[in-house]
Each structure stands twice: as C-alpha cells, then as structure tokens.
Image (cartoon, rainbow, N blue to C red):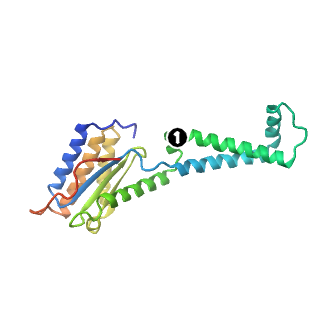
C-alpha cells in the first residue's frame, strides 16, 4: 500500500454504520480497530546498532592500519607507540560512534520499520491484535460472539480475531475473503471502504452461522476505535 489518506468524521460514521448493518443480521458483535502502528520496534533498532558495532570491530581487526592511521591523523600524529590500552581505546571509540550513529539514524521510524523483517512485523501485528481483542471483545458478549477487525497502518497489515463461539464454527481461512476485500480497497487509498468491505464480508459469515435473535442486544460499540 502507498501512504494512506487519513479518515475524516464522515468516513468514521460510514464504518460505524456498516458495523451496525452487519450486526443487524446476526448475533455477532464486530469491533473495528485501526492503529497507526503495532509496535515501536526499538529492540530491532538496538539489534541493528549492535550489528553495525560488531562490523566496526571486525573491520578494525581486518584492517587495523586504516583505523589506527586515521586516529593518528586526527590527533596530529602524536601517537608514537601503540599500547594495548590505546588500541582498545580506539576500538571502543569506533564501536561507540558506530552504535550511537546507527541508533540516531534509526530514530527515523520509516527506516526502522523498513529494516524490520517481515515475519517480525507480522508477529507483532498479530500479538497487538490479540491483545486488543482480549481487552475489547473477548468474552464480553453473552454468546462469545465477538470478533475483531484490526488494521495496522504502518505495517500495512490486518488481522481478524474471533471469540471462541465463532472460532469453533468458522475456520480461520474463511476470513480470507474479508481480508482480500479490504486489501483491494486499501491499495486504492480507500481506507474507510476497505474496513467497510471487511465488515460486510464478516457480517455475511456471521449471519450464516449466528443468525440474529429477536431479543438480541448490541453489547459492544459500533464505532471505529483508533489507537
């Protein structure tokens, strides 16, 4: 996906209306959450900084004359004898500069995210979705029929997490149509339409397996939750 145009109040109302319409046909309770990102990935930045520091040490070991000569030039050529203490001092200085510089560069979040491996991003989004589901939907409905549609913008990933009653009847791969419908709209920079498409697909599945009863009550909010 390219950069996503932010949603406005009209878009939010459309998503809420789609949730209400989908729930009017089933006993399911749909929760929609949109997060700017699912993780800060500070540990990934730290790992990259440590890796660059190790590379610097390896380079110093492979080509010591270059770094030691550079140090002599920077200090005005006053080094007459390389003692072990001085050599280790240069190694510490070089490593510190490399680690610190890399960390500062990776404070730029787009680069940090780009350098984060796909499997890590996928796992963090899934973990955040499950965490949000446990807080906002799990076992909060009478029939255990809550379901979460979670979209993480920075990672360009989405997850669908269902409560136990739904999971017992609907295989996870069934939600693939909802994910595909959402992705089609998101690729065209249609954020609200993507969420609405997913809600409609999920609503169709819920209506088939959990038809709405006459005394059914709305147990979870229909509004889009933004994190």
| Horizontal relation, residue 2 to residue 42: left or right | left
Label 1 secondary element: helix
User: At 68% across and 47% down in the image, what residue appears?
Assistant: 53
Horizontal and vertical percent position of residue 29: 22, 58
User: At 38% across and 58% down in the image, what residue appears?
Assistant: 131
| Horizontal relation, residue 175 to residue 115: left or right | left
Horizontal and vertical percent position of residue 116: 52, 48
Residue 77, by quadrant, is top right
Horizontal and vertical percent position of residue 187: 35, 40
Q: Quadrant of the N terminus?
A: top left
User: At 21% across and 60% down in the image, what residue appears?
Assistant: 28
Whether 80 is drawn above or below 162: the answer is above
Q: How crowded is the residue under tag 1: few (<14 C-alpha within 10 Å), some, or many (20+)?
A: few
Residue that protrudes farthest toward the right in the picture: 80
Q: In this rendered view, identify the residue nearer to me: 174 or 52.
A: 52
Whether 178 is drawn above or below 142: the answer is above
Residue that protrudes farthest toward the left in the picture: 214
Residue 14, by quadrant, is top left
Q: In this rendered view, identify the residue nearer to me: 94 or 195.
A: 94
Disc 1 marks which residue? 111
User: At 81% across and 43% down in the image, what residue appears?
Assistant: 64
Total marks shown come to 1
């Amino acid at each position: 996906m390219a950069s996503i145009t932010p949603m406005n109040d009209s878009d939010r109302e459309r998503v809420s209306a789609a949730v209400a319409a989908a729930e009017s046909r089933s006993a399911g309770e749909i929760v929609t959450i949109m997060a700017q990102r699912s993780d800060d990935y500070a540990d990934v930045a730290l790992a990259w900084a440590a890796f660059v520091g190790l590379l610097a040490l390896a380079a110093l070991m492979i080509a010591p004359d270059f770094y030691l000569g550079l140090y002599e030039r920077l200090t005005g050529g006053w080094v007459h004898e390389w003692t072990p203490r001085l050599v280790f001092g240069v190694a510490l200085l070089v490593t510190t500069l490399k680690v610190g510089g890399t960390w500062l560069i990776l404070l730029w979040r787009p680069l940090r995210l780009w350098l984060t491996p796909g499997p890590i991003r996928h796992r963090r989004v899934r973990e955040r979705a499950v965490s949000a589901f446990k807080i906002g939907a799990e076992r909060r409905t009478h029939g255990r029929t809550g379901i979460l549609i979670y979209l993480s913008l920075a990672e360009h990933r989405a997850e669908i997490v269902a409560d136990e009653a739904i999971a017992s009847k609907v295989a996870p791969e069934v939600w693939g149509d909802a994910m595909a419908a959402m992705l089609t709209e998101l690729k065209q920079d249609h954020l609200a339409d993507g969420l609405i498409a997913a809600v409609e697909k999920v609503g169709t599945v819920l209506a088939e397996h959990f038809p709405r009863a006459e005394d059914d009550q709305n147990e979870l909010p229909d509004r889009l939750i933004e994190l």
